[in-house]
Image (cartoon, rainbow, N blue to C red):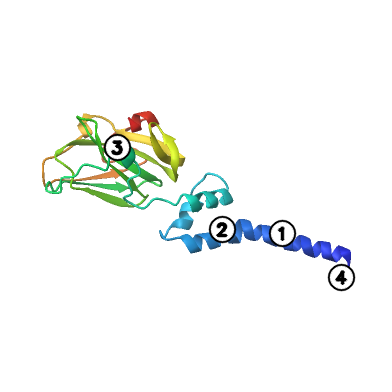
């Protein structure tokens, strides 16, 4: 085989290796690590960074499961009264994941923090009697090390912070009561809402 032929052959093999690393390898990664059923969709619809960067980041920072409480270290493990039979069912209809905080309207104590994947719902059960409102952050690609106000953990892409707008949207439970709230990214949701910043969200 001539020297020129060897160079051409080597170049072809190099191109195949690069394509494998940037494309085929990612497909194998998704296939071997997708335990959520929508992992490949999660990668494709995250508009941050290139595919290789996203792949490497997500290997080390897997997407949280539904109902995960990322802010326990800052707001506490949650207040429960399982005899109250009160619950809040939070439905996330957005095209982004969310972390929802249930806040006591009078003490301002954040008694729950729950990660809710897009298109899914979560039941906050055993909520003590009281009056509450919601705050939430939405986005894609969860980074457990990102600083969000005074807390740690946040979304890298499409990040936003929201809360229910005023006292007309506060929700009171006095026993055996269930509230169902749907998070919408557009007007027309169950409650009026307003944008807030990261420090308002975490304080």
Q: Is residue 15 above or below residue 54?
A: below
2 lies left or right of 160: right
The answer to which of marks 3 and 1 sits earlier in the sequence is 1
Assess disc 4: are there few (<14), some (14-19) or many (≥20) residues with their C-alpha within 10 Å of its C-alpha: few
12 lies left or right of 133: right
C-alpha gap between disc 1 and disc 2: 16 Å
Q: Which residue is mark 4?
A: 1
**Quadrant in which the C terminus is drawn:** top left
Q: Which residue is mark 2?
A: 26
* Residue depicted at 79% across the width and 65% down the height: 9
Which of these two is toward me, 194 or 156? 156
Q: Secondary structure at mark 1?
A: helix
State whether residue 186 appears in this view.
no
Q: Secondary structure at mark 3?
A: helix
The answer to which of marks 1 and 4 sits earlier in the sequence is 4
| Occupied quadrant, residue 103 | top left
Q: Which residue is mark 1?
A: 15
Residue 24: x and y in percent read 60, 61
C-alpha gap between disc 4 and disc 3: 70 Å
Q: Which residue is mark 3?
A: 75
């Amino acid at each position: 085989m001539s020297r020129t032929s060897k160079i051409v052959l080597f170049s072809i093999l190099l191109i195949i290796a690069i394509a494998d690393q940037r494309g085929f390898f990612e497909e194998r990664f998704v296939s071997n690590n997708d335990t959520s059923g929508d992992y490949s969709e999660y990668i494709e619809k995250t508009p941050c960074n290139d595919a290789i960067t996203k792949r490497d980041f997500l290997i080390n920072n897997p997407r949280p499961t539904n109902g995960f409480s990322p802010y326990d270290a800052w707001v506490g493990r949650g207040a429960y009264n399982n005899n109250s039979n009160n619950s809040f069912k939070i439905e996330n209809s957005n095209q982004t994941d969310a972390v929802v905080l249930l806040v006591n309207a009078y003490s301002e104590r954040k008694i729950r923090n729950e990660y809710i994947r897009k298109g899914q719902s979560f039941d906050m059960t055993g909520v003590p009697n009281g009056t509450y409102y919601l705050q939430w952050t939405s986005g894609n690609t969860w980074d457990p090390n990102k600083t969000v106000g005074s807390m740690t953990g946040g979304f890298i892409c499409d990040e936003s912070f929201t809360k229910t707008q005023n006292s007309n949207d506060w929700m009171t439970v006095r026993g055996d009561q269930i509230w169902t709230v749907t998070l919408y990214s557009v007007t027309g949701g169950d409650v009026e809402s307003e944008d807030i910043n990261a420090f308002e969200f975490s304080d």
